[in-house]
Amino acid sequence: MTSLRPRHALAILCAFPLAVTAQTTQPTTPDSQVQSLQDIVVVASRRPEPLADVVGDVSVIGPEQLRAAPGDGIADILSRQPGVQFTQSGGPQTATGIFLRGANAQHTLVLIDGMPINGSTSGGAPFPALDPAMVERIEILRGAASSLYGSDAIGGVVNIITKKGAQDRPLSAWANVGYGTYETAKSSLGLSGAEGGWDYSFSASAGSSKGFDATRRLKATNQTNFEHYPDRDGYRNHAVSGTLGHQWAPGHRIGLTAYNGYTDGDYDAGVDLPNAYALSRQQAYGLTSTDRLTDWWDSELRLSFAKDSYDDRAYQSRFNAIRRQYSWINTFKPQEDHQIALLLERTEERVQGSTQYDQNARNTNAAGLIYKGRFDRVHTQASVRNDNYTGYGNRATYSLGLDLDLTDTLQVGMLGSTAFHAPTFNDLYYPFELYTFMGFPVGSYAGNPDLKPEKSRNIEAHIQYRTADTLLRATLYENRIDDLIIYQVSEPIPFFTEGTMRNLNKAVIRGLTLTAEQRLGDTTLRASADFLDPRNDDPQPGQGSELPRRARQVFHLSAEHRIQALRLGAEYQYTGNRYDDGANKVRLGGYSLVNLIAAYDFSKSLGVQVRWNNALDKDYVLVDGYNTPGSNVFVNLSWRM
């Protein structure tokens, strides 16, 4: 595919209204309205607001979509959304990364109930320890967002909202039990309610799977894969989450949220380590006080604690990272349709484990302003934030977005924003380590304390048509990333390599995302197309000009039809070719996947859901040398009180 040129993308955007105006809108009922009109999201401005009022590219994975994916992991569910690609090294229990709009995996900020959980050592989120059974919905904000959240949000933000359940009655409960391919068994249950000013919820889940062989015998170049060990690599996991809140006076509420997820997962490490496995745990706890101080002044004070742990039993290595965060947001509404939020935030990071880092602590103090307003048909949001990092000083970021309602159904908009990503403790402070093979030294690695934060500038434009039954949107974007951190190897002597991280590259990621949704009575049709140009704009010797593991084209099609209590659905996904390595020498082939869905409600309380992923048993690769699931079926029985 040739590069996505601005004039080509603009031509598509200009033609978009012609396709929009050709739509015929049919009379609708409340039951047939597009769900996105009704969603309330937090991720776009750090305050609850209707999705229809959001300035920016935001979407929501709601309860219905989550129920239609029993047995799937968080990354699988996210990968079916526009602008999202992912990598996985041999199953849901292994290393997993999300590419949001083509940015690196460490450039996607992941939150649980608004609390950041990106690892201080790895930079990525511990997806194996996140269980969808605990999740009520997922909010996705695409585009640079450091002016709202600080470091890591170069590609965007994923906010995972845990289950709160029905809190408008004294007691409700639910339970699931399911079984599928690879001897995968999962179960979960929960309860929730509210009475006398108190509200509560509790959820728990457990699962296990025999899994499949994580690695392939040969790599894409037909070379032997020395990581391969011919066995089945499974996992065991469990998770609990809960909330407890009390409204002690009108407009005043204090609440506690908690999440604790754990995975014991197998992986392959070659014939010398036949029983390789690792333990991953993610904990996140938050205490929040929300107070309506006056008719025009709201306050939210939050204390949060997050801990991610990784214990590799094959290599006897352990990493623990703790993140304590204190935030205070005061929102002022001087007049209708206008609000200003003042943010004060402090983050404390601490790491420990079997590796003794040269430094194991850093702090960040931040202050920000967020303005959101409406002037007749013009919607605007502006934000500015300054983060003061230990060892780096001040990092200022900003964002400005404008949406114009041309008609009641047609909207155009633009947004410009900046972001940054602070290097991880592994990048900066990992101590010198010597690698040996058969007793001989072959290389070494050490952190680089002179690294600078990666910086990005993002600009995007969109046009959108929306009615009760129809949603069409085209988004054109460009994200320029400077001081990109890469692994650099030198060869001072034969057969010995020294490696470290350096700020060597610049990247320019251009893209166009087209999305559509149409409801026709009991049938819902959805489609999306992503055209991506992920360029390494300043390749070093030995590097290619394309960022690895990102496909230039991704297409999604889905259809769902209801026949009274029966729901039938089908999904199609095409992912194009991409390179596995930075040198652009190992090409991974494109692939197509077909998934089938069925669900039947025996009553208002009891139902069954069936999902058949990769129905055509496509053999495909996400990371060179690692296997992916073949044709697999999962059957779930659900009960709701």
Image (cartoon, grey):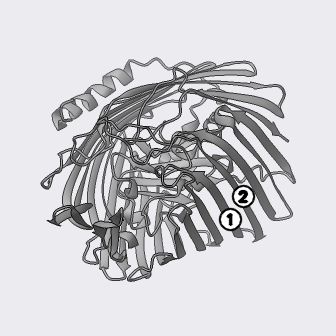
| Circle nearer the N terminus (2, 1) | 2
Q: What's the mark number on residue 71?
A: none
| Amino acid marked by disc 2 | Val
**Camera-side mark, 2 or 1:** 2
Front-most of 63 and 484? 484
Q: Which residue is mark 1?
A: 258
Residue 300: quadrant of the picture: bottom right
Which image quarter is the N terminus in? top left
Give the x, y percent position of residue 176: 77, 40
* Above-or-below relation of 411 to 327: above
Which image quarter is the C terminus in? top right
Q: Secondary structure at mark 2?
A: strand
Neighbour tally class for label 2: few under 14, some 14-19, many 20 plus, Cα within 10 Å = many
Front-most of 302 and 499? 499
| Amino acid marked by disc 1 | Ala
Is residue 492 visible in this depiction of the protein? yes
Q: Check contact, mark 2 vs mark 1: CB within 8 A.
A: yes
Is residue 55 visible in this depiction of the protein? no
Residue pictured at 21% horizontal, 35% vertical: 4
Give the x, y percent position of residue 14: 25, 29
Q: Secondary structure at mark 1?
A: strand
Residue pictured at 46% horizontal, 17% vertical: 24
Residue pictured at 12% horizontal, 54% vertical: 541
Q: Which residue is mark 2?
A: 240
Neighbour tally class for label 1: few under 14, some 14-19, many 20 plus, Cα within 10 Å = many
